[in-house]
Amino acid sequence: METALQLHPVRQEIIPLPTQQPLTITQPLRTDKITPFIEANTKEVSIHHLQSDCVVPVFSKDNEVTISHPAFVETVHEAAQQFFRGEAIDSPSVRVSHIIKGRIPEAIHKPVNQLLETDKTIYYERMMFCFEIPTICQDIDGNPLKLTIGGVRAYNHENLYNKKSAEKFKVFVGFQNMVCCNICVSPRTATRVRLR
């Protein structure tokens, strides 16, 4: 015996909006400054920094190297160039977090205050990148939607203390919408928004 789930309103209430002074917007809503595709605790780095200043971790049981962050970014970017041949493709914007610091073997017994920059090694546990294909776009009510491709790599999802195994990557392709589409905003909620 199946039962159908039915929802009924408990009460219907109209809440009057409080009277307020009209809002004055002193800053433009859209600026020409490009904001990062993700912020949180990340920082922007270049592909060159990942290639020249960072080490590539290995699987410790068999000393096999992992696929490096720059190799992942370059592979996805090259695949996009081949697949979308003839389209303009932006260069990738790369952001990283969770720095892992280390030392070269010759500096293992040095005190921290005596370490030289050449003694230190780093790599980032997490890396994400994103690039746009501006020639594949759609304009919806004055808001441009450009095809966006990106990926995420996190070494903490790999078991680096074991033998080399299949590595995990996340890739996305879609249109990045920078306008809120939530049509469930109530008038009461809208009155609490403050513009600075």
Image (cartoon, grey):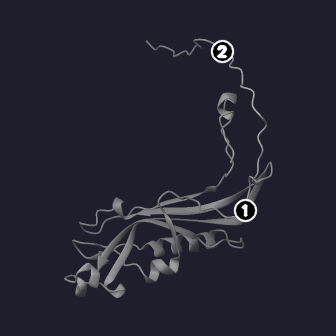
Name, please, the residue furthest toward the left.
109
Which residue has dot 1 on it? 136
Q: Residue 52 appears at what percent x and percent y?
A: 44, 83
Q: Quadrant of the N terminus?
A: top left
Q: Residue 28 appears at what percent x and percent y?
A: 76, 54
- Element under label 2? loop
Q: Is residue 126 left or right of residue 85?
A: left
**Depicted 174 relative to depicted 86: above or below:** above
Image point (44%, 62%), residue name: 169
Q: Residue 58 appears at what percent x and percent y?
A: 30, 74
Image point (66%, 15%), residue name: 13
**The quadrant where residue 157 appears:** bottom left
Image point (37%, 78%), residue name: 55
Closer to us: mark 2 or mark 1? 2
Is residue 41 among what the camera can see? yes
**Depicted 188 relative to depicted 178: above or below:** above
Q: Residue 125 appears at what percent x and percent y?
A: 38, 66
Q: Earlier in the sequence, mark 2 or mark 1?
A: 2
Q: Amino acid at mark 1?
A: Ile
Is residue 184 among what the camera can see? no
Q: Amino acid at mark 2?
A: Glu
Which residue has dot 2 on it? 13
Measured Cα–Cα span from mark 2 to mark 1: 46 Å
**The quadrant where residue 20 appears:** top right
